[in-house]
Amino acid sequence: MAPEAADPVEGSVHEARLVEPPECTLPAGAIEDCGLLPADPASVPLAEAEFIIAAGNGVKDWPAFHAAAAALGATEGASRPVCDAGALPRDRQVGASGTLVSARCYLALGISGAPQHLQGIADCEHVIAVNADTGAEILKRADLGVVADVQEVMPALARLAAERGGHDA
Amino acid sequence: MMLDIAVLVSAGRHPVSGRPRCAPNDARALELALTLVHQYGGSVFVLHAGDPEQPALPGYLGMGVAELHVLPVPHGKDSLPALADTLHRRRPDMILAGVRAETGWAGGCLPYALARELDCPIVPNIDRVPMCEGGMTELHQVCPRGRRRVLRAPVPVVITVDPAAPSPRQSAFARARRGHIITESWFGPAIAAPDPGEPGPARRRPPRLRTATAGASAEQRLQALTGAAENHGRLVETDNPDEAARTILAYLAENGLIESRETDGPHK
């Protein structure tokens, strides 16, 4: 090798340089996507709802039920006896004579699980049931069954769900 | 801003009685147009391609429009050239239609073909138009699971109205009698439309049972159908309501059904 000569630098050579971003304009006639609106769980039709909290004959404390639904950000549903009694409107009825739902999660409170009701939730991915009766049919269908008093679980559920940050409804 | 809205309406057919009626999707489009014109001012141009004597058409007049314009496209001919010619000359700000017709070919392609002919964008499945100002419209597009996507599109634009849009107002017989059906002329080639075939009654396919249930009782068959007999779940018995609630929330978080505690950000 000749004097004052050296081997070429190994590796790559780097330089940090500011680059002007290219001009970006929307072409004329372009449609701009401004993102998704959050769905209002209270107004979503049952058949489209993702997370349903359903009340059965075991639910007596309606303010607590509505509070739990709001805290969890869930759509309200009901069994036939509840709709017959007029506690919730008919379009909230889940089951063979109501809506066949396909929610990802179905939380059944105080629902015993009549075959017609179970038919309505056959397509649900996760079923959670709270019932005071150990022999209730819905506990057999449920992925998580909780044997407890529904009237006491609902306020606890609302309080704990609100504590953990809850859901922006 | 004065809006000029064109609404494309088709003849519907009642699914049970088979009587001619307003196509519900097109009636929703007309309802949306009437609402927008009430809000911003302007005019609604109701357009139908087909038979001017079609008995379903007065139903749209009964919703409160004075005139319905009909392009007399012969039966079995494509209505696209007639619509494109008329709308090209008129150049409305918005062209509204239902997602698909109820009779005939009913493929839902016509708005797309029309948008291509008129060289303007198309936005499908819209249920609300909250804003329309300064040559831009804001649109709410219907997405699965009850969600809505907000889109901004320039006018002129072709919009198809989703069945989830607000229901159309009631059609009044007297208003339908007072309205006029006007036959328009148009220039363009008469292209044969694809034959939609003969409509026939649909038969529902019987649901398939999950298990072979020969000889089982009715209750057992229903249980097999609803999955009640399968028990893979966890059962928790507790007297403490807080523990029950915590179990439920833990299950929900575990399966990603609500935001889990670890990923919870600050309160929004």
Image (tube, coloured by chain):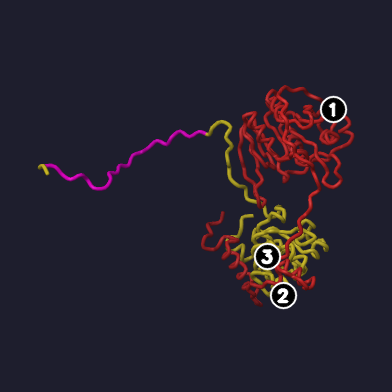
Chain colours: A yellow, B red
Where is B155 relative to B226, above or below? above
Say which label, 3 or 2, has the lower sequence index. 3
Q: Residue at x 79, y 73 (%)?
A: B217
Secondary structure of the residue carrying numbered label 3 = strand
Asked which quadrant contains residue A70, the reply is bottom right
Residue at point 71% right, 32% down? B40
- Considering the image in quadrants, where does the N terminus of chain B appear? top right
Classify mark 1: helix, strand or loop. Answer: strand
Please state which of residues B87 and A56 is positioned toward the viewer in this rendering: B87
Q: Nearer the viewer, residue B42 or A47?
A: A47
Q: Nearer the viewer, mark 1 or mark 2?
A: 1
Q: Is residue B186 visible?
A: yes
Q: Are marks 1 and 2 on the same chain?
A: no
Magenta segment range? A4-25
Magenta span contains residue B252? no
Main SS type for the magenta part?
loop
Please report contact status of discs 3 and 1: CB closer than 8 Å, yes or no: no
Mark 3 — residue? A107
Residue B232 rendering spot, x and y as whole percentages: 64, 72
In the rendered image of this protein, does residue A27 appear above or below residue A122? above
Is B59 in front, or is A7?
A: A7
